[in-house]
Image (spheres, helix red, strand yellow):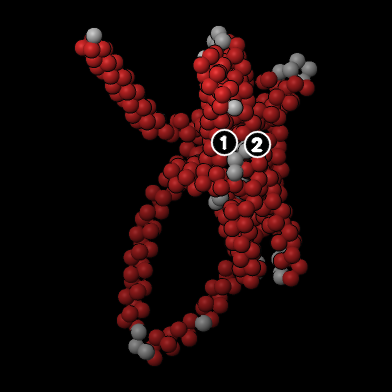
C-alpha cells in the first residue's frame, strides 16, 4: 500500500513536472513570437487602441442614422476627424509659413552684420598670430563640408523613403482601424456565442466592458490634459504679445500644436514647447526664454500632479500607480510604451480585481456547502 501510494505520488509529480515544462516552453515560445512580430503587432495594437477610442462616437452616430448603419457611422466619424484636422492645419500652416518667410528675410541682415564685423576678426587674428590655426580650421571645415555634401544625396533618399513608409503605415493603421470599427461588434457577438455557461458569459462581458471603459476614460483624460496644456500656452503667448514684439495671431496656432503633441503622455507637451520656442525665437529672444521657463515649470506640474490626478480618476488607478506605469512603459517600449502604459495598467487592474472577487466568491460557496466549515465559522463568530 505504501509502495503503491509512493508510485502514484511519483507519477503525479512527473505529470506536474511535464506540464510545468510545457507551460514554460509555451511561454518562452510566445515571447519569441511576439519579439519577432513586434512591428506588425504594434500596428495592430495602435489600430485597436484607436478603434476603442473612436467606438463611442461611431456607435452614437450609427444609432441615430436611419438604418443604424455601422459603416455610415464610421465613415461620418472619419469625415468629422478629417474636418477637424483640416481646420487645425488651416490655422497652423499660414502662421508657420509667415514665420518662415520672416526668417528668410532676416538671414541677409544677419549676414550683413557678420560681414561688417569681419575686419574686427581679421585684426584680432593678425594681432595674435592666429593665421595658421585659422587656415587649418577653415581647411578642416571645408573637408567636413565636402563629406556632408557627399552624404546629402543619401540622406535625402533615406528621408524620402522614411516619409513614404510613414505615410503607408498611417494609411494602413487608418484602414485597419476602419475595419475594426465595422467588424468589431460582429466578432464580439461570435465570441460571446461560443459560451455555454450563462454565468461565465455574464462575468466575462462585465470584465470586457470595464476594460473598454478604462481605455475610453484614458483617451478622454489625455485629451483633457492636452487641453489644459494648450489653454496655458494660449494665455502665456497672449500675455507675452502684450509686452514683447510678438504677433497675437500666433497664440491660437501654437496652442493647437501643443494640444496635438500633448496627446502623447509625459514627453508630448515638451516636443510642442520646443517647436513653439523656436517660432518665438524668430520674433523675440526674451519672449522665447520666458516661455521655455514657464513650460519647464508647467511640465513638472503636469507630469507629477495634473496628469496622474486626472488619469487616476479616469482609469480608477491611484496617482502613484499611473506615474509608475508611465515610467515602466517608457523604459521598456519607449514612446509607444508611454502611450499605452496607463490603459494597460488599468486593464490589468480590472482583471486582478475580477479574479480576486471570483476566487473569494468560490471560497464562500465551498464553505457554505461544507457543514464542518459552516459550524466552525459560526463558532468563530
Q: Which residue is mark 1?
A: 346
Q: Residue furthest bottom?
A: 127
Q: Which residue is mark 2?
A: 217
Residue 22 versus residue 134: which sits nearer the camera?
Answer: 22
Quadrant in the picture for the C terminus: top right
Residue 328 versus residue 256: which sits nearer the camera?
Answer: 328
Q: Give the structural element (helix, strand or loop) at label 1.
A: helix
Kindly report which numbered mark, 2 or 1, lies closer to the viewer in this rendering: 1
Q: Is residue 347 above or below residue 326?
A: above
Residue 342 versus residue 291: which sits nearer the camera?
Answer: 342
Q: Residue at x 24, y 9 (%)?
A: 1
User: Along the horizontal axis of the image, is 158 left or right of 82?
Assistant: left
Q: Residue furthest front?
A: 379
Q: Which corner quadrant of the image does residue 84 belong to?
A: top right
Q: Is residue 281 above or below residue 150?
A: below
Residue 64's spot in the image, x, y percent? 78, 22
Q: Residue at x 74, y 26 (%)?
A: 60
Q: Earlier in the sequence, mark 2 or mark 1?
A: 2
Label pair 2/1, CB-CB below 8 angstroms? yes
Q: How far is mark 2 from mark 1, CA to CA?
A: 10 Å
Q: Which corner quadrant of the image does residue 72 belong to?
A: top right
Q: Give the structural element (helix, strand or loop) at label 2.
A: helix
Amino acid at each position: 500500500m505504501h509502495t503503491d501510494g509512493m508510485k502514484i505520488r511519483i507519477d503525479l509529480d512527473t505529470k506536474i513536472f511535464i506540464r510545468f515544462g510545457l507551460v514554460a516552453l509555451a511561454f518562452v515560445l510566445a515571447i519569441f513570437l511576439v519579439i519577432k512580430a513586434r512591428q506588425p503587432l504594434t500596428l495592430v495594437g495602435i489600430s485597436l487602441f484607436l478603434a476603442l477610442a473612436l467606438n463611442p462616437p461611431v456607435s452614437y452616430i450609427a444609432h441615430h442614422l436611419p438604418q443604424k448603419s455601422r459603416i455610415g457611422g464610421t465613415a461620418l466619424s472619419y469625415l468629422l476627424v478629417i474636418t477637424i484636422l483640416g481646420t487645425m492645419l488651416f490655422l497652423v500652416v499660414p502662421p508657420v509659413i509667415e514665420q518662415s518667410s520672416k526668417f528668410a528675410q532676416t538671414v541677409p541682415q544677419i549676414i550683413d552684420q557678420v560681414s561688417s564685423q569681419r575686419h574686427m576678426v581679421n585684426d584680432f587674428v593678425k594681432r595674435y598670430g592666429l593665421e595658421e590655426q585659422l587656415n587649418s580650421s577653415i581647411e578642416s571645415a571645408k573637408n567636413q563640408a565636402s563629406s556632408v555634401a557627399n552624404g546629402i544625396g543619401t540622406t535625402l533618399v533615406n528621408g524620402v523613403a522614411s516619409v513614404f513608409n510613414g505615410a503607408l503605415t498611417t494609411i494602413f493603421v487608418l484602414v485597419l482601424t476602419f475595419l475594426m470599427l465595422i467588424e468589431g461588434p460582429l466578432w464580439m457577438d461570435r465570441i460571446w456565442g461560443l459560451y455555454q455557461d450563462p454565468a461565465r458569459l455574464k462575468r466575462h462581458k462585465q470584465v470586457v466592458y470595464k476594460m473598454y471603459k478604462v481605455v475610453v476614460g484614458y483617451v478622454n483624460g489625455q485629451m483633457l490634459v492636452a487641453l489644459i496644456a494648450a489653454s496655458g500656452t494660449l494665455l502665456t503667448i497672449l500675455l507675452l504679445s502684450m509686452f514683447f514684439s510678438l504677433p497675437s495671431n500666433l497664440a491660437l496656432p501654437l496652442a493647437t500644436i501643443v494640444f496635438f503633441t500633448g496627446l502623447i503622455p509625459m514627453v508630448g507637451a515638451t516636443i510642442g514647447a520646443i517647436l513653439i520656442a523656436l517660432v518665438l525665437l524668430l520674433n523675440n529672444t526674451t519672449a522665447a526664454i520666458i516661455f521655455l521657463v514657464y513650460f519647464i515649470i508647467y511640465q513638472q506640474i503636469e507630469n507629477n500632479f495634473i496628469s496622474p490626478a486626472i488619469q487616476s480618476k479616469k482609469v480608477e488607478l491611484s496617482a502613484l500607480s499611473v506615474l509608475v506605469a508611465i515610467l515602466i512603459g517608457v523604459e521598456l517600449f519607449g514612446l509607444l510604451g508611454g502611450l499605452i502604459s496607463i490603459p494597460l495598467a488599468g486593464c490589468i487592474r480590472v482583471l486582478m480585481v475580477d479574479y480576486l472577487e471570483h476566487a473569494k466568491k468560490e471560497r464562500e460557496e465551498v464553505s457554505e456547502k461544507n457543514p464542518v466549515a459552516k459550524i466552525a465559522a459560526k463558532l468563530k463568530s
